[in-house]
Image: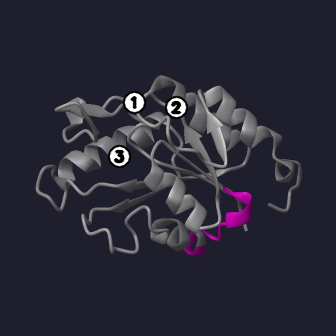
Amino acid sequence: MSKALFLDRDGVLNKVVLRDGKVGSPRTFQEFELIPEAISFVKSAKELGFCTILITNQPDISRKKMTRYQMARMHQKLREEMPIDYIEVCTSSDDACFRRKPNPGMLLESANRYKINLSASFFIGDSIKDIEAGKRANVRTILLKTEYNQNIDGDFNCQSYKEALAILWREPWNLSENT
């Protein structure tokens, strides 16, 4: 079994979009802007032996506010710029959906499909849904602190990708070849 770094998309790998003063996801390829520090962070995680898996809710698909084509273009750009091994997407807007964060479905399905050791894995996100999904899947959580999530805590809280990488680097299982 391998270890994974599960990654939220919006706010972690790409910039969020503000609509009417609220944080949201990009809906078009033109709104999609990668965070440069995230690119080097994912590359470094790969060098540490983590399988990188994107875990993202994209309910704007089911709400007809974004097309699958636009989402596919965004994910193609992600794969061109950073070493993402797998992409898991939930397009449902129904909070009862097992795959929709904060439910753990995408993480648990990925662990089964790609033979991931959840106890040796992390989920980095920027929202309460990310942290809850990680905890429900028994994955250690890293909250990337921003101006819009100061009242949330993960197992680890980071102000930068450098701090998050230090957490991945110092964990004891990184010294073992059996992870």
Q: Residue 36's x, y, as percent?
A: 48, 24
Q: Kindly identify which residue carries mark 2.
A: 38
Dot 3 amino acid type: His
Q: Main secondary structure of the magenta part?
A: helix
Query: Answer yes or no: do the residues labelled 2 and 3 have beta carbons within 8 Å?
Result: no
Residue 33: where, in percent of width, then height?
33, 29
- From the image, state whether disc 2 or disc 3 is nearer to you: 2
Image quadrant in which you'd find residue 28: top left
Residue shown at the point (58%, 38%) measured from the top left: 42
**Residue 116 among magenta residues:** yes
Report the side of 117 relative to 7 (left or right).
Answer: right
Q: Marks 1 and 2, Cα distance to the nearest angstrom? A: 8 Å
167 to 147, vertically: above or below: below
User: Looking at the rendering, in which quadrant would you find the N terminus?
Assistant: bottom right
Distance, label 2 to label 3, CA atoms, is 14 Å
User: Magenta stretch?
Assistant: 112-121
Mark 1 and mark 3: span between their CA atoms?
Answer: 11 Å
Q: Position of residue 121 (x, y in %)?
A: 68, 57
In the picture, which quadrant includes the C terminus?
bottom right
- Vertically, is 127 above or below 145? below
Q: Which mark is residue 75?
A: 3
Question: Which residue is at a point 78% across and 39% down the rendered structure image?
Answer: 169
Tag 3's secondary structure?
helix
Disc 1 target residue: 34
